[in-house]
Amino acid sequence: MSTKNRPTTPVGRPDNAVPGIPPVGGDSLPMQGRTQSRLETARMNGRQSVSQRLRNINLKILVLALGLSLIVVMTTVVVSLQLSVTEAYEIKSRGLASYVAPALVFDDRPAAQAYLDALGESPGVISATVTRGDGEVFARYERPLTNPGDKEPAWLPVIEVQDAVAYRGSELGTISMQVSLLPVYRDALAITAVILLASVLVLLLVALNLGKLNASIVNPLQHLDDVMQRVARSGDYAQRAPESDIEEIHRVSVQFNELLGQISAREAKIEQLANFDLLTGLYNRRGLTTRVEYMLRQAEKQDQKPALVFLDLDNFKAINDTLGHDVGDQVLAEVGQRIARTARGGITVGAHSRPALQLGRLGGDEFLLLLPDLPHQDTVIELADRIRETICEPIQAGGNSVHITASIGIACYPRDGHSAAQLIQHADSAMYFAKQQGRDQCRFYDPELTRQMSFRMRIVDQMRDAITANEFRLAYQPLIDARDGRIRSAEALLRWDCPNEPNMHPGIFIPIAESSGLIMPLGRWILQTACHDAVRMGRLAGHPIRIAVNISPAQIFARGFVDLVRECLDEAGLDPTLLELEITEDVVIERYQAAHDPLTELAEIGVQIALDDFGTGYSSLSYLKRLPIGRLKIDRSFVDGLPHDADDLAIVTAVTALARALGLQITAEGVETEEQAALLKQKGCDVLQGYLYSPAVPEADFLQLVARADQAARPLGSQAPSATPLRSSNVS
């Protein structure tokens, strides 16, 4: 039998599926194996088919019926003939007795003998005897034996007929005859032979009719068996057994077809769960990987140039955290539909339109689009831009108008890889690069990205070892009190003495730590160390030293962060008012609700909250009122152009006025000249920080700077120590 594939269109397949691509998952091999094994076992055990069994039963019945019929017929014939012969010879015996009576009266032996010899014309008479009343044999006849074989078989019964010989009422003697039944049996055999021949003819006619009867029963069963075997071998549950006009077989066929339908629906459901995303109805990672592999095989055969478009929604986690997962799910479903609609619109290449055929959700907020044959990169960019524009349109979900963007990475075959895993990985790398470049962008894969990813993985591995090997240290950059030039606080900045990567800049390894999750153990170490150092430096300096520590978004939103801060303060014995946590403006705006509770709780125990890089994000003044922020830090990008850049001057003036109006402290970063320091002091800045005073230095050097400032109590910037310029942030 020919093996058939399963239907190429799975139940519940989304519109973006490609007709003609075999479904993922394959046949139900274990079930087929068990079914075929049972069939083979049945054959090995010598089990008969229904046709064979019916044929054998009918044959046995016919043979038995024929045998019984022959026995009955032969018995009836023999008995009937035997009775007829007996009756005939009884009549003959009475007639012969009447003829022999005168011979007995007149003692005429020759006449009696003549009557008896006349019996020789009757082949069945073996012997005849006339006996007087006194027992004397008066006359006797015996059939002559021409050949020794003429003697009757010993097993053959003999009929004895006897009558009285009387004359005028007086009994003179008896006449007796022995008659052979051999002629009777011969006649019976002849009759039986004729009957047997007729029975054979009847048997043939019956056999022909029984064959038709068997076929009417067996053929529907055979068709049913054929369907079962095809299903077992091919796994094609779409096949159906033909219906029969025999009620019982019809019921079996209907029930079998219903069972196939249930199995088909179950298999389709299993395939749906295994290869499709329940939320969006699109292919999942497993289904997409299979489609990519198929697409690459077709591309190799047909010399096509397919591409993979990897989409990741920007800041999607903020939607889940602020609006809830139900709203997030609605956004994902809508984004999937928008991408599908845009892709189904086709990609115009000259006068031709090539449909974008495959779309799936890899997981989370990641989508992958498969484009089968695109000769020009501009074609992919055209589609990617249309998709970004579509996604940017407001999404109504849960009564909210959600605005979201997407970063897109593209990998092309065969330039960027020859396997599904490689192309997906490279498209992912290109997407990651697009996020690093500012999000809401589209980037093609570049081999340099692989080098960067390899470098990133190497740094991650080295950072894990560095945490346990104590290769990290804290450096402290003085924060100068604008009123008297004294140093009463410092910003703790992380440094890594990496033996394998000399001059490892914080701007390189801290973003890697944040994206890899290592910022959590590293941030814990920074808090613990900074709190202990603050206690020790305050004791050595002779007055309290406030420590400012940069906190990553992952730390703020992590469960138990407030408890961690309390634990570090308690272990070190540090007054909470001497700890200042710096957070960035964009994190607060994007995840205000998630940031509000932990920041408020920390402020209630006395921890100071500072807003770093103020003005560089998407500013919204409302959070300054709603969050327990006590300090604004003017970013160095606004200080660099002072005092000559009018725009920077306007921004600094506005920020300081805003802070004063809200009762907030102000720290200016990146102060490098005396003119800048004087202007910032004039505008009302409370604290100055920058290379004019000192870069971040080890604890011992910082204490020397504190001592000098305390002793001199000099005007601001009068004796600034020389320093190698470093960025004044935790990522510097």
Image (tube, rainbow, N blue to C red):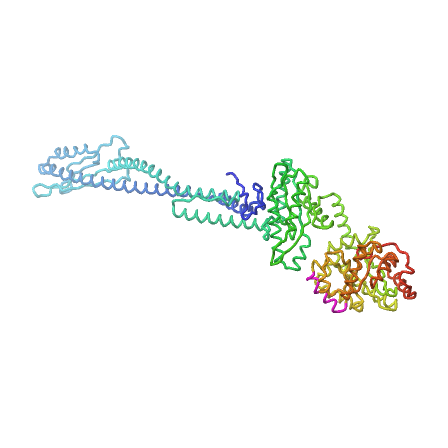
Horizontal and vertical percent position of residue 565: 75, 65
Task: Tell me where residue 550 sits by quadrant.
Answer: bottom right
Residue 151 left/right relative to 637: left
Horizontal and vertical percent position of residue 580: 79, 64
Q: Is residue 600 magenta?
A: yes
Identify which residue is drawn at 70% across, 39% down: 415
Horizontal and vertical percent position of residue 169: 8, 43
Identify which residue is drawn at 77% across, 48% down: 455
In this rendered view, identify the residue nearer to me: 127 or 245.
Answer: 245
In this rendered view, identify the residue nearer to me: 256 or 13.
Answer: 13
Identify which residue is drawn at 64% across, 55% down: 402
Residue 465, relative to residue 71: is it above or below? below
The answer to whether any part of residue 469 appears in the image is no
Residue 77 left/right relative to 424: left
Range of residues picked out in magenta: 592-606
Q: Is residue 599 magenta?
A: yes
Residue 519 left/right relative to 342: right
Horizontal and vertical percent position of residue 534: 83, 65
Q: Which quarter of the image is occupied by the C terminus? A: bottom right
